[in-house]
Image (spheres, helix red, strand yellow):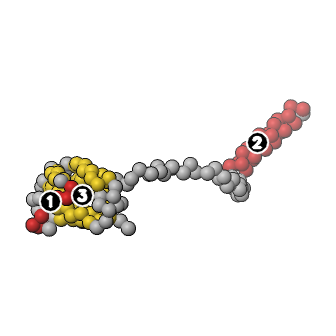
Amino acid sequence: MREHLGMRSLHKIVLAILLSTLWACGGEEPAVEPTPEPTPAVEEPTTEEPDAPEEEALSLDMRDSTFQPETLEVPADETVTIELANKGRFPHNFTIVDRDISVTVEPMGSSVVQFETPKSGTLDFYCEFHRGQGMTGKIRVRG
Ligand SMILES: [Cu+2]
């Protein structure tokens, strides 16, 4: 008798375990956890803008056959640097007669020119090879 009871209770236990397992599986209803997302008080590390106190680098693209841009604004009475980049398929040239500058840049090549800007007005520049085709530009003093 005792043994019989023992078996019964064992059955009950097994059944209980089975049921609870089933229950657990079937009842895996996600008890919608309103986990309040902790507002990220962590401040995104703002990628520091490199302060550019240094004078802006001016760049001038040479194409077939124009300058881009055709007008460059520069500060008055200062030394400026212009990076020339030949993006065309032909050699181009950058000439400022008033500054004794004449630089030729090969296709895909680049060069740098530096000169004093006037106190006012403009400086004309052009490409020796394509001046006749309108490959000219102006450097205008700002303000
Ligand atoms: Cu040219």
Q: Is residue 69 left or right of residue 35?
A: left
Question: 143 or 4: which is nearer to us?
Answer: 143
Picture coordinates of residue 48, whole percent (x, y): 51, 49
Against 72, is 56 above or below?
A: above
Q: Is residue 70 left or right of residue 28?
A: left
Query: Within 10 angstroms of label 2, few (less than 14), some, or many (20 or more) residues?
Result: few
Q: Residue at x 72, y 45 (%)?
A: 21
Against 124, is 48 above or below?
A: above
Amino acid marked by disc 2: Ile
Amino acid marked by disc 1: Cys
Q: Residue at x 44, y 51 (%)?
A: 52
| Residue under numbered circle 1 | 127
Please tell me which of labels 3 and 1 falls first in the chain: 3
Q: Is mark 2 within 8 Å of ligand 1?
A: no
Q: Is residue 46 left or right of residue 128?
A: right
Question: 14 or 127: which is nearer to us?
Answer: 127
Q: Is mark 1 within 8 Å of ligand 1?
A: yes
Q: Residue at x 26, y 66 (%)?
A: 122
Please tell me which of labels 2 and 3 falls first in the chain: 2
Res 30 → quadrant? bottom right
| Residue under numbered circle 3 | 61
Of the residues tagged 2 and 3, which is closer to the observer? 3
Of the residues tagged 2 and 1, which is closer to the observer? 1
Q: Quadrant of the C terminus?
A: bottom left
Question: 17 or 88: which is nearer to us?
Answer: 88
